[in-house]
Each structure stands twice: as structure tokens, then as C-alpha cells.
């Protein structure tokens, strides 16, 4: 479809180019998800007429010269100039200029690797700013010092590009990063760039390292920054601070996220799992301890997550994972009963992901003793839990049929039956025990009256 548009535009004296990430990803040999086309040399009215001839035109941002065609994953834009009118990401005045020329059109883009253009009909790559050379060298370099600093989101975009593509940031670009003010960014935009790093990068730790180096970690991620000066016992964490450990766990989680039930949740859990160490870590003689850091971390994790997102399911998932993250490996190490692991899994919002987090936590450190992988034992325990929960169990209707009347104690009866279920007690036996328990409660209440 892009070639058909380009052909129609050429008939009117214009030229159409693939732009942005399309050209970058094609050169890198990466899968291309978004197709962006920029049309030069025809008026907005002429472009609209071309699109109307081809299909059903959609006005994605007509005032900005951005269109689409229904049924096609294609953004069609016109060259435009932007002028900053404030400090925010959206504080720009936009002017469409079909005759701006490829150099000035490319100059408004963020990084050289994103500023290349490819003629759709001829295949010629137009590269005014050395993007292909920077791509070969793995360098992220800004296009224009004059315009780059007008959009503070570019710091986060640069950080996630570096994490996703394994790029280093050019020194002069890092200097621009340090001078930019990110305080006016809406959290939705921060969340969007962070999620790309968490879900698409092999080493999402790079995202945070670039923010740390550029002085921007404290604004959006102060709880994480607090871990930089939080020591750990070198006998168990020879890698260094809790911050270093967290980033190692984050990269280990990235290797496991394709196995997760909730990949984004797993990544946020890995990022926040040890936030509590910043407020619980103490030196006791020659030891460094962080007692109950998983409990203290729940509140810190909630504050962290609410600063970034409004997704209640994600926030609740992360809080639950923070609280439970230490327990699987500890349970396996102590050879606790399967009843104990049943109780743990029952508390978890996602037992499968909890085990992945525990694995990443174990792999993301350097200890004096060889790492013990409890995955096989924990997988067996999880299978036992799933088998237990699939068996017939006492439900409310069973209690009603047995003669118990609904009332304030009914939830207590169900809770007792649930404990028996987790203990693996068969339904008939569990029903008898629950009825006996109900009888004891009634006798006790009658005596107290």
C-alpha cells in the first residue's frame, strides 16, 4: 500500500519516504512493527485526495498533517516544523510545510539513527546526519542541538533506545541529557518509555544506568536511587549495593519474561522487589542485615508504582510479589512441607510468576557459595498445589445443604474449609471437620451468652 501511495504522489510531482524507526530497523534486520511514511512536495489537500482514491482516509492528526488508511497499519505524515511554547512534552506549535525539504524535515527528529529516510519507489536512503554510520558504531547521537532540548521526553526515549538496541550515548548527547528538565512530563509518557525498556530490552538495566549518569534517576525513581548507597552483606552479595543487585535481577528477569503469565508485572516486580532494603538495612557487627525488607518494601513499591501508572491490577500484582519474593527459595532451602508451599501459593496473585521472580533474584547476585537452583523442587511443589486445587472441595452450597444457615459466622466456616483444602484433606472428610468446627463455634457462643 505504501508503494501505491508513493506512486500516486509521484504522479503529482511529490515524493514519499519511509522514515524513522522503519529505516533503522530495516538496516538492523529487526522486525518492523510500525510503518511511517512522510510525503513531500504535495499540498495537504492533494495528499487527502490521493488517500481518498486509494481507501478510507482517517484523520489521525489532520491539523498536524498526519493521516491513516482504515485497515492498514500505516501512518502517513507531511513535513512539519515545530516550535516550543513551554516546558512540557506537548507544548509545541506545529506548522505543516510540504516543501520544507528532506534535510530540514529530518532535522526535527531526535537521534541520527532515527533521522534517515528511504525513497519508497527507488529505495535510495537519504541520510543527512550520519545515521547509518552511528548505527554501525552503535552510537545514539542527537540530530540538532538547537531543537533536541525542546522535548524532554527524548531523554527517556534515548534511555530506552540504548537499552533495546545496545547503543551507547554519545558524550555530547549525554551532556544535553543532563541539562534537560523532565519534571513537566506526564506520567503516562514516562510509563510508555519505561515499558518499552522493560518488555523489549535484553538488558533493561541500561535504561536506569543512563538516567543515573544523566542525573535524572531521582525525579521519577527516587526509591531506586536510594538503593545506590544501600550496602549488602558481601558474603551473599559480592556484586555490591542493593542497586547493583536490583539491576542484575532485572536483567535476569528479562531472560524469563517470555515464560511469565504477566510479563510486564514480572519486570516491575523485579525492579521493585528490594526497595525495602533502603529503610531496613543495618550493620550488626561484621554483618549487614535487612530484616523484613520485603514487608517495608510493599509501601515503597506502591508509592513507586503509583508515580508511574494508574493500572490497579499491575500495582496490586507488584505489591504482592514484593511481599512474597523471598519465600519460595527459603521454603525450598528449609525443605518445608508441601502444605506450607500450598499456603504460600494460595497467597500469591500468580504463583508461576512468583517462582520466576525467585529464580531471577537468585541468579542476580554473586555469592561466596555456588548458587543453588531450587526450580525443580519448586516446580514440583507448584504442580502439587495445582493438583490440590483441582480436587473437589467444600463450598458454600455444601454447608447449606448440610444444614448450616447463612450468618455472620459463615465466612469463618468457609475459611476453615479452605485451610483443610490447602492441607489436602479430601472433600468428605473436610465437610465433616467443618461441620464439627461450626458446632464447636456455636457451643462456645452459647456458653458466652
Image (tube, helix red, strand yellow):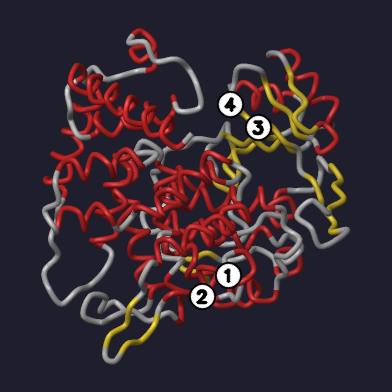
| Residue 3, position as x, y percentages in the image | 58, 25
Pointers 4 and 1 in contact (CB under 8 A)?
no
* First in sequence: mark 1 vs mark 3: 3
The image quadrant of residue 397 is: top left
Q: Name the residue under label 4.
A: 73
In the rendered image, the residue lying farthest to the bottom is 285
Which residue is drawn at the image coordinates 33% and 78% (left, top)? 289
Q: In this view, does 335 lie above or below 36?
A: below
The image quadrant of residue 78 is: top right
* First in sequence: mark 4 vs mark 2: 4
Q: Which of 21 and 266 is in front in this view?
A: 266
Q: In this view, does 423 lie above or below 163?
A: above
Which callout, 4 or 2, points to the residue nearer the camera?
2
Q: Name the residue under label 3.
A: 75
Q: Is residue 108 above or below residue 225?
A: above
Q: Nearer the viewer, residue 90 or 8?
A: 90
Q: Name the residue under label 1.
A: 222
Amino acid at each position: 500500500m505504501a508503494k501505491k501511495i508513493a506512486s500516486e504522489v509521484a504522479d503529482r510531482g511529490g515524493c514519499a519516504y519511509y522514515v524513522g524507526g522503519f529505516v533503522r530497523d530495516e538496516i538492523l534486520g529487526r522486525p518492523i512493527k510500525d510503518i511511517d511514511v512522510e510525503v513531500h512536495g504535495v499540498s495537504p489537500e492533494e495528499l487527502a485526495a490521493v488517500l481518498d482514491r486509494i481507501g478510507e482516509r482517517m484523520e489521525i492528526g489532520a491539523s498536524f498533517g498526519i493521516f491513516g488508511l482504515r485497515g492498514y497499519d500505516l501512518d502517513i505524515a507531511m513535513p512539519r516544523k515545530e516550535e516550543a511554547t513551554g516546558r512540557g512534552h506537548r507544548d509545541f506549535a506545529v506548522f505543516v510545510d510540504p516543501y520544507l525539504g528532506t534535510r530540514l524535515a529530518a532535522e526535527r527528529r531526535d537521534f541520527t539513527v532515527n533521522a534517515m529516510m528511504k525513497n519508497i519507489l527507488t529505495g535510495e536512503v537519504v541520510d543527512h546526519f550520519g545515521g547509518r554510520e552511528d548505527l554501525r558504531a552503535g552510537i545514539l547521537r542527537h540530530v540538532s542541538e538547537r531543537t533536541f532540548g525542546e522535548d524532554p521526553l527524548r531523554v527517556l526515549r534515548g534511555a530506552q533506545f540504548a537499552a533495546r538496541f545496545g547503543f551507547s550515548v554519545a558524550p555530547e548527547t549525554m551532556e544535553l541529557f543532563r541539562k534537560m528538565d523532565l519534571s513537566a512530563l506526564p506520567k503516562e509518557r514516562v510509563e510508555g518509555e519505561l515499558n518499552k525498556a522493560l518488555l523489549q530490552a535484553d538488558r533493561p538495566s541500561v535504561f536506569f544506568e543512563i538516567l543515573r549518569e544523566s542525573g535524572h534517576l531521582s525525579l521519577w525513581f527516587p526509591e531506586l536511587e536510594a538503593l545506590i548507597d544501600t550496602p549488602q552483606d558481601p558474603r551473599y552479595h559480592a556484586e555490591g549495593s542493593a542497586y547493583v543487585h536490583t539491576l542484575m535481577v532485572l536483567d535476569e528477569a528479562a531472560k524469563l519474561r517470555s515464560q511469565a503469565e504477566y510479563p510486564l508485572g514480572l519486570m516491575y516486580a523485579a525492579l521493585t522487589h528490594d526497595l525495602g532494603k533502603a529503610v531496613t538495612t543495618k550493620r550488626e557487627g561484621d554483618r549487614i542485615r535487612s530484616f523484613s525488607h520485603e514487608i517495608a518494601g510493599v509501601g515503597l513499591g506502591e508509592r513507586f508504582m503509583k508515580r508511574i501508572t494508574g493500572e490497579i491490577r499491575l500495582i496490586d500484582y507488584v505489591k504482592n510479589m514484593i511481599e512474597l519474593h523471598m519465600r519460595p527459595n527459603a521454603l525450598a532451602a528449609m525443605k518445608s512441607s508441601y502444605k506450607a508451599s500450598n499456603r504460600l501459593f494460595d497467597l500469591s496473585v500468580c504463583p508461576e510468576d512468583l517462582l520466576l521472580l525467585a529464580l531471577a533474584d537468585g541468579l542476580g547476585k554473586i555469592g561466596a557459595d555456588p548458587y543453588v537452583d531450587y526450580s525443580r523442587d519448586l516446580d514440583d511443589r507448584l504442580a502439587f498445589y495445582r493438583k490440590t486445587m483441582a480436587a473437589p472441595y467444600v463450598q458454600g452450597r455444601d454447608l447449606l445443604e448440610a444444614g448450616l444457615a447463612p450468618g455472620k459466622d459463615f465466612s469463618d466456616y468457609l475459611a476453615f474449609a479452605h485451610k483443610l483444602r490447602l492441607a489436602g484433606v479430601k472433600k468428605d472428610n473436610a465437610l465433616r471437620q467443618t461441620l464439627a468446627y461450626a458446632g464447636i463455634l456455636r457451643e462456645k457462643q452459647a456458653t458466652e451468652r
